[in-house]
Amino acid sequence: MNVKTIIAALLAALPLAVPAWAEETQSISDADLALYREGINPAEVLRNTGGELFNKKMGPENLSCADCHEGQKPKAKALTGAAAAYPKHNKNADRVMSLQLQINNCVEKGIKAEPYKLNSAEITALTLYVKGLSNGMKVNVATNGPAQPWYEVGKQVYEQRRGQRNLSCKTCHDELAGHTLRMQKLASIGAGASHWPAYRMVNGDTFLIEQRFKQCMSNARMAPLKEGSDPMVALELYVTSLANGAAIETPGFVR
Amino acid sequence: MAETGKALIKLPAGYKKGDVIQAQTICIHPQDTGYGKDKEGKPIPAFHVTSVEVWYGEKKISDMEVHGAISKDPYISFKVRASHSAPLKVVWKDTKGNVFEQSAEIKV
């Protein structure tokens, strides 16, 4: 048997030799992943910090988020299930707001305190806490009415090829979904937005979905969009709307 | 992103007196080994957990020696027999002399 025959035989045997886990989008085995899921998600610690921030008194009137949202004030509105509808159009601001923008809006207008930086640990913690109050509920993002132009823009951002490698989100996560890139399967976006904010094992840290978009964009050699900017919020609206109907499960735990 | 030293203990639900339960603990910690370098090429000094103690009520039930090889945000899980109602306290000590504590109540 010469070398060529051996290689041909090996190539022919290759599809059979692919282990079962390679079919999954995770690059670790199901058994390993189950072990990780069994343990504590480190993002839960951050969510507890978010709970503390939710009860922290701030601003000139010494108010906390909990003061208004847990029933003591007249304008009170319970937040259970509220996060499922975000990103959502805000009438007063006349724009679509992601959950973190809405929290900052509340901090600025309601509590009259300094809003958090959009890439700070505090806003991640608070978003994680507020989104956690809607755990188990279904994502229900409106894409019609005043949010429709934003949805269209988001779809365009998703499909627009740009950057040094001339890639769009769609290229990898739609057209090439299921193919292998750097030892792992490309995932179709699907209902992925329902488990963000999530803890990423590669970074050992918790991220908002917009921060994840930024990481993805710099890997694809695009100029990353700014957190909270109009196209970024539109993209978040579009991607979250793809998860409509899926149960919210935060904090997520991803590779 | 979370602050160093924030910790969490998780106990299972629905155990009875005398049951062996699985306790899970995590402590947010960077676990720098001392061998890494930052973006400017300067070495990052060692900063990791050195010992983990477990107290069940007044009694120390476990003493673990931990080194820099343990990954970031050390997660430790162990079994304990729920023999009486008492707080389960876990104490982390690190190379900078910090002491972090977290406790959870075992109720039987």
Image: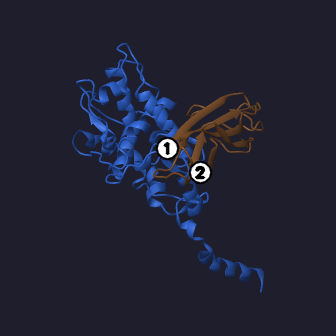
Q: Residue at x 31, y 30 (%)?
A: A70
Q: Residue at x 72, y 43 (%)?
A: B64
In which quadrant of the rendered image does the N terminus of chain B lie? Answer: top right
Q: Which residue is mark 2?
A: B81
Amino acid identity at mark 2: Arg
Sequence-first disc among 1 and 2: 2
How many callouts does the rendering have? 2
A198 lies left or right of A246 = right
Q: Residue at x 45, y 52 (%)?
A: B14
Chain of the residue under label 2: B
Chain B: its colour in the image is: brown
Chain of the residue under label 1: B
Q: Which residue is mark 1?
A: B107
Amino acid identity at mark 1: Lys
Q: Secondary structure at mark 1?
A: loop
Give the percent coordinates (x, y) of residue A167. Answer: 50, 50
Nearest the eye: A233 or A122: A122
